[in-house]
Amino acid sequence: ARAVTLFIPTKDFYEKKDVRGSYFHEFVLLNNKVLNSQTEKISEYELTEYLMKEFRFKGLKKENEYIKEILSSGLEKIDDETYRKKIFDKPPYSKGFFTDNGEFKFLTEDFEYNKKTFEVVTAKEAKALNSQFKRDKNVYVNPNSNFIMLNWLEQNIEKKRVVFSNKIPKNIIFAKGGDVINNFINCKGENAYYEIF
């Protein structure tokens, strides 16, 4: 806060009409304005509208049009203020995970299948779930992993990006975030599981 040159006071959920949801439950809520701001504040839409006008950009729809689009995009209406995401009709991974036996595996479990030369494992980084945080751009490997894997790493990834750790199971390349490793491998997969061709 000491470094900033501009503060933009924003309206809270009671001071604006909005739509809100969460990754963690299936409901989307229509938020109606119930309070008038006691001080000069601005909503996200009002800020966008102001900037579009100042920079002479065209194409901004009315705020209610965006809200209507969101609420009509595959949501089930429960009541006037509550909608439900239909994607929750089929829970994620209800048919199992993308592993040999369909069960979730932790990094601490045995990943040495002996079927492939090595495995690539990625995960969301605990302290970098949103775009404003810096992400770890390193890959982590056990120094006792097989020669073929270590040789592949040396040829494909900058040495300064490789961190050796005995905490990582052997023959695993662990990266915090798929974008770190995707530049270097020919892979297929979903979410946090990758299979080397």
Image (cartoon, rainbow, N blue to C red):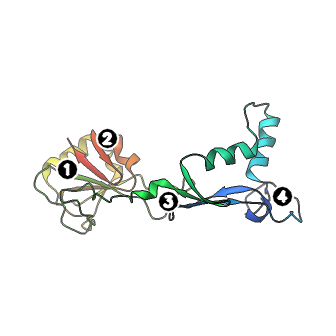
Q: Nearer the viewer, mark 1 or mark 4?
A: 4
For residue 190, side relative to residue 53 (left or right): left
Earlier residue among tags 1 and 4: 4
Mark pair 2, 4: CA separation = 46 Å
Callout 4, which amino acid?
Lys
Callout 2, which amino acid?
Phe
When the figure is inspected, residue 35 is found, relative to residue 179, above or below; the finding is below
> Which residue is the site of mark 3?
128
Disc 1 packing (10 Å; few <14; some 14–19; many ≥20): some
Q: What kind of element bears circle 4?
A: loop
Callout 3, which amino acid?
Ala
Q: Nearer the viewer, residue 153 or 69?
A: 69
Mark 1 vs 4: CB contact within 8 A:
no
Mark pair 2, 1: CA separation = 14 Å
Callout 1, which amino acid?
Leu
Q: Nearer the viewer, mark 3 or mark 1?
A: 3
When the figure is inspected, residue 196 is found, relative to residue 192, above or below; the finding is above
Earlier residue among tags 3 and 1: 3
Q: Nearer the viewer, mark 2 or mark 4?
A: 4
Q: Nearer the viewer, mark 4 or mark 3?
A: 4
Q: What kind of element bears circle 2?
A: loop
Earlier residue among tags 2 and 4: 4
Label ID, residue 184: 2
Label ID, residue 41: 4
Mark pair 3, 1: CA separation = 28 Å
For residue 47, side relative to residue 107 (left or right): right
Query: Where, by quadrant of the figure, is residue 176 drawn?
Result: bottom left
Residue 147 point in image, percent of width and height = 13, 50
Mark pair 1, 4: CA separation = 56 Å
